[in-house]
């Protein structure tokens, strides 16, 4: 059957758009990879199968070995499929002259092996599309059937996956993704450092949290219990690190020992077991599972060449591998060589290692600062860290909990339903309850503060304007508008609900996918309705990320087994998913680079605003006029501009300040100076003081005459003057005190 040309064209076009590197392990060659039995009660047991097609030579080379219960003539049928399409089939008799295979003519009783090659006609080679030799993670299958020549009864059926040596599962993709996440983390740190602790400052998108959240989404997309094409399954595996799934053999062995001592069963769920197993996914093992062949033995490809009845020695070694059927979360984690029962403990230990590294780093920096303080003076900007390093550690841990809360919920719920160690289940329950309590406490505290200030001041802008509040709680709402500070609450609920659906619905792909689609759509509606981010770039980037999330779940619907979509369509959809998610990842990386350039090139916006405010104030003071309301007679503009600390507009002691307002000069009689010498007492001074004090109690006739006389003076003579008080005696006016 000819592979549909439309599918080939679409695959070729999509491959041109793929932006991530592909590991190339071969040329125009298709090979089998492991094998399994596809028949019951076989008279012939196969122990080795190796089939290779070389397009350049147009030959199929095969190497098969096994045992037979009796000697018999057989016919062999070779069937090759790609993406669910049968692209090659050939039946031959090993005893024919053109296809003679001495080891199979007839099949002897006991052990046997057969090696040979078959020429493939051009008519069949042309039916295999060129895309099959270049597309990564080829979904192909080769089947070899041996039938009795006498009655046509099937004696043996062996099937194997076919690959072309190309895959999206390469370390380079993981390293690139980790580099993007690291760059986002560094950029977020530089933004916070540039803000200088300024309250109300938002971080430019994409932030570290947004990048990690996107990587976790791609990893979670590969955990659903659906029939993924190999190309998408390999692609999602590259982002497992974002959720804490990092393979370390020593750690896995320790977890196995821990589980064994706490009620775990290591028979078919351990590192040693996975080393000796071949993973069979749902889409290639559904029929095998129905036949109840889960316990059949598999054997990897090797150089075994056993003659009839084992008369010749082995030229190689054969590694027995068991067939291990997997799906969903189990299939995702075990392709990383992590046993499914070790999933939660792996993430817990990775989390503990990260926390330990952060703690050691902060304490080491603290020691450096203390040593610096003993031998010199360090910048004032580091004084805050020196005083609050424990608080910084607590804030960092809280931020890490917020980043991992979604996937932590997934692993804990999965541990409850699939774990076998009571201690691991207990740790999952304690940590999930603790993380939920921490986030609930901060939510309640922020809500309480917002409600308090809204009641007192009419709004909750104090969450952004007050530095102490901002320093403590801003990690939850720093990028949101002041009127949408509460958006972090539905965001936490969104992470919790999404991952509960994935873990709780494991094994039910349709329910998982529909639940995911509903949750992602609700989050999309919330973002479009509120547009809560304070920066326009934040709104656009997060809305686009959410759109891709929704479209990804729609594409995953194609992989649901109940819908019965053709395998070729699934492969095309998987490739579209890879391209779509790769393009978004590349766009985030470009935006991170652009933000980094902007931060390095532009001035600090807060420092710039502060300088502009000072410049405007000095300009206003320079342009004051006598009639300007700001031109107070009790303020010296020159002195005000010269001082670094702004004092009150009205002087506390206007009459005695240097450079201030100088009242009308006093007469010698009033000041108590005679000929430049001050009178410090005497009868005259005392009498003058008593007379003036007495005049405060009432107005004498002479005083009235004096007052009326003053009113008749010309305007030039009406200058400000002090009361008629003798300032020579001790008092509050001139020198001396009580």
Image (tube, grey):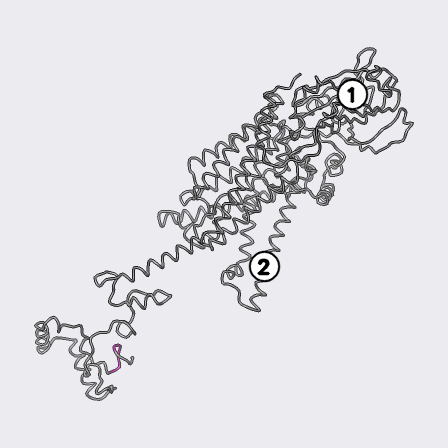
| Disc 2 secondary structure class | helix
Q: Is residue 327 left or right of residue 657?
A: right
Asked which secondary structure carries label 1, the reply is strand
| Viewer-side residue, 242 vs 669 | 242
Residue 64 screen position, x and y as percent: 81, 25
Q: Which quadrant holds the N terminus?
A: top right
Mark 2 crowd level (few <14, some 14–19, many ≥20, 10 Å Cα): some
On the image, numbered disc 1 is attached to which residue? Answer: 118
First along the sequence among labels 2 and 1: 1
Spot the residue most to the bottom. 682
Q: Is residue 721 above or below residue 478?
A: below
Marks 2 and 1: CB-CB under 8 Å? no
Across and down, in percent, residue 294 comes to 74, 26
Where's the C terminus, which quadrant?
A: bottom left
User: Which residue is denoted by mark 2 in the rendering?
Assistant: 365
Q: Residues within 10 Å of mark 1 (few under 14, many from 20)?
A: some
Q: Which residues are magenta?
A: 729-733
Rendering quarter of residue 304: top right
- The majority secondary structure of the magenta stretch comes to loop
- Say which quarter of the image contains residue 164: top right
Q: Residue at x 87, y 27 (%)?
A: 306
Report, in whole angstroms, how far the alpha carbon at label 2 lies from the one at label 1: 69 Å
Q: Is residue 290 above or below residue 651?
A: above
Query: What residue lies at 74% left-to-right and 41% top-to-bottom?
Result: 260
Q: Looking at the image, which residue sits at the far top?
A: 151
Q: Nearer the viewer, mark 2 or mark 1?
A: 1
């Amino acid at each position: 059957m000819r592979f549909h040309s439309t599918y080939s064209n679409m695959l070729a076009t999509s491959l041109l758009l793929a932006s991530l590197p592909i590991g190339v392990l071969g040329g125009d060659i298709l090979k089998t990879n492991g094998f399994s039995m596809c028949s019951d009660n076989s008279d012939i047991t196969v122990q080795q199968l190796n089939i290779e097609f070389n397009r350049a030579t147009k030959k199929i080379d095969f190497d098969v070995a096994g045992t037979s219960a009796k000697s018999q003539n057989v016919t062999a049928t070779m069937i090759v499929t790609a993406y669910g399409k049968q692209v090659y089939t050939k039946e031959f008799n090993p005893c024919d002259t053109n296809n003679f295979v001495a080891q199979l003519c007839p099949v002897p009783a006991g052990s046997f092996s057969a090696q040979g090659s078959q020429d493939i006609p051009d008519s069949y080679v042309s039916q295999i599309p060129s895309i099959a030799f270049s597309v990564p993670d080829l979904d192909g299958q080769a089947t070899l059937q041996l039938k009795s020549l006498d009655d046509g009864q099937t004696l043996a059926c062996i099937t194997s996956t076919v690959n072309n040596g190309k895959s999206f599962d390469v370390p380079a993709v993981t390293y690139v993704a980790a580099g993007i996440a690291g760059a986002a983390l560094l950029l977020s740190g530089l933004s916070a450092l540039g803000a200088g602790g300024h309250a109300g400052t938002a971080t430019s998108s994409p932030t570290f949290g947004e990048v990690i959240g996107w990587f976790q989404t791609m990893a979670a997309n590969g955990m659903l219990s659906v029939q993924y094409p190999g190309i998408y399954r390999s692609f999602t595996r590259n982002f497992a690190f974002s959720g804490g799934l990092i393979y370390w053999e020593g750690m896995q062995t320790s977890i196995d020992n821990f589980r064994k001592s706490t009620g775990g069963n290591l028979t078919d769920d351990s590192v040693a077991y996975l080393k000796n197993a071949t993973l069979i996914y749902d889409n290639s093992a559904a029929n095998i599972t129905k036949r109840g062949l889960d316990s059949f033995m598999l054997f990897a490809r090797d150089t075994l060449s056993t003659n009839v009845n084992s008369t010749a020695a082995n030229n190689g070694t054969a590694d027995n591998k068991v067939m291990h059927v997997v799906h969903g979360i189990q299939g995702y984690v075990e392709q990383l060589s992590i046993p499914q029962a070790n999933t939660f403990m792996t993430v817990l230990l990775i989390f503990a290692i990260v926390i330990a590294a952060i703690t050691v780093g902060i304490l080491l920096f603290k020691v450096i600062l203390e040593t610096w303080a003993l031998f010199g003076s360090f910048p004032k900007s580091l004084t805050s860290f020196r005083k609050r390093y424990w608080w910084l550690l607590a804030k960092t841990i809280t931020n890490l909990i917020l980043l991992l809360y979604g996937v932590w919920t997934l692993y804990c719920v999965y541990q409850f339903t699939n774990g076998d160690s009571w201690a691991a289940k207990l740790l999952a329950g304690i940590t999930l309850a603790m993380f939920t309590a921490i986030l609930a406490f901060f939510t309640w505290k922020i809500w309480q503060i917002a409600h308090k200030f809204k009641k007192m001041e009419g709004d909750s802008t104090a969450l952004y304007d007050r530095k102490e509040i901002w320093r403590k709680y801003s990690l939850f709402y720093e990028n949101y508008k002041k009127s949408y500070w509460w958006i972090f609450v539905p965001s936490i609920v969104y992470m919790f609900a999404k991952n509960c659906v994935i873990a709780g619905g494991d094994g039910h792909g349709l329910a998982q996918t529909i639940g995911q689609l509903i949750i992602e759509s609700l989050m999309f509606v919330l973002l479009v309705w509120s547009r809560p981010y304070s920066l326009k770039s934040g709104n656009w980037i997060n809305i686009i990320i959410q759109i891709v999330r929704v479209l990804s779940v729609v594409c995953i619907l194609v992989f649901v087994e109940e819908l019965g979509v053709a395998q070729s369509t699934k492969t095309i959809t998987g490739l579209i998913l890879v391209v779509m998610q790769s393009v978004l990842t590349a766009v985030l990386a470009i935006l991170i680079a652009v933000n980094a350039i902007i931060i390095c090139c532009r001035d600090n916006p807060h420092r710039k605003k502060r300088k502009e405010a000072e410049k405007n104030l000095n300009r206003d003071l320079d342009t004051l006029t006598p009639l300007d309301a700001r031109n107070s007679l009790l303020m010296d503009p020159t002195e005000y501009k010269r001082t670094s600390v702004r004092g009150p507009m009205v002087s506390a002691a206007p009459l005695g300040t240097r450079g201030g307002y100088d009242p009308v000069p006093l007469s010698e009689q009033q000041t108590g100076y005679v000929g430049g010498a001050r009178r410090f007492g005497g009868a005259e001074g005392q009498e003058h003081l008593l007379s003036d004090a007495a005049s405060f109690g009432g107005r004498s006739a002479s005083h009235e005459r004096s007052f009326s006389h003053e009113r008749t003076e010309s305007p030039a003579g009406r200058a400000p003057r002090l009361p008629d008080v003798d300032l020579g005696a001790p008092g509050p006016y001139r020198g001396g005190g009580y």
